[in-house]
Image (cartoon, rainbow, N blue to C red):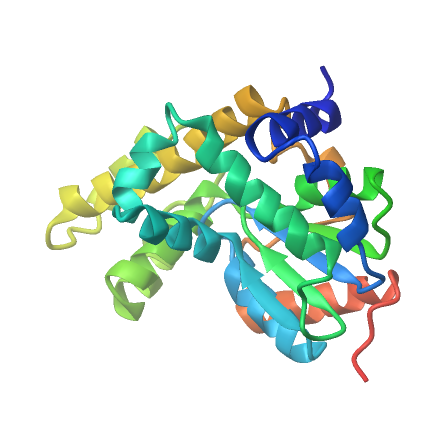
Amino acid sequence: MDYISGIESAFRKYIGEGSIEKLINDISNKPMILIAGDQLTGKSTQAKRLAQHFRGDFYSVGTLFRQSASDRGITVAEQARLLLTERGIDVEIDYKTCEMIAGKKINSNLGVIEGRQPAYMGNFMASLGKKDLVRIYFQCSIREQALRFLRREVGEEVYQLGKKTITDKNYETLEELAEEIKLLNIDENQNIIKIFSENQNRDQDDRHRYSGLYGFDYGNLKGYDIVMDTSNKEADEVFEMVVTKLKVFGFRAD
């Protein structure tokens, strides 16, 4: 079963038989920028900046996830564990994402949606007739993700140290990179490596979950219009590159 059919079947099963027709009725002509990517690739930062640049609304699928947990009276961590067995939670969040992509609930004239799956949900909405979508994927090397993690969790000084001392190469495994991080002699080194590894594993878990639920891998770059490698680039440089590429698709700030 192709993933378009997989999404439709899941929506009809978990949301209701009339769910697809409702999405079709909600489709507007508002342009949408759909942003995906793994953790620490800069997708959230760029999504917020793009929304501000184009005077649009920013939405994060993570917010939907947190609201879903709150509605159930459980923590985000508890809900994350439930995702391993309760498919309906994912489907509910994905359906709400599609409602946003449709555009009817967007307050401004443009929406920017960031998360794991918006681009592939956008492909589904395109199959229902939604136009003016552009799908962007942010990626970077494991080394770059590790450096950004160190900047976020430890600080700028350790980030700069890591840039100088962690070998700039393509790492085959996370374990290989962990050995280089150990050489930085950070306080609570083992804990830092453990948390970073858990972050990486969550990315893989999410990809496996969507593959099992709908039949797509959001890391498959064929599903995107623009692919941005943010390795060794600061946020301002990435932003200018994205804005330039978006002009090809007719996105221009007033």
Residue 197 image position (x, y, % from top left): 30, 37
Quarter the N terminus occupies: top right
Residue 229 image position (x, y, % from top left): 62, 51
Residue at 26%, 39% (x, y): give it. 78
Q: Is residue 88 above or below residue 182?
A: above
Q: Is residue 212 above or below residue 140?
A: above
Q: Nearer the viewer, residue 70 or 198?
A: 70
Residue 172 is at least partly visible in this image = no
Name which quarter of the figure residue 17 lies in: top right
Residue at 15%, 51% (x, y): give it. 185
Residue at 46%, 46% (x, y): give it. 168
Q: Is residue 16 above or below residue 37?
A: above
Extreme-top residue of the structure: 1
Extreme-left residue of the structure: 188
Quarter the C terminus occupies: bottom right
Name which quarter of the figure residue 177 lies in: top left
Extreme-bottom residue of the structure: 254
Q: Nearer the viewer, residue 71 or 77?
A: 71
Residue 98 image position (x, y, % from top left): 66, 47
Residue 43 image position (x, y, % from top left): 55, 57
Residue 16 is at least partly visible in this image = yes
Tell me if 59 is positioned left or right of 180 in this view.
Answer: right
Tell me if 87 is positioned left or right of 28 in this view.
Answer: left
Q: Is residue 72 above or below residue 9?
A: below
Residue at 60%, 25% (x, y): give it. 13
Count of number-bearing discs: 0
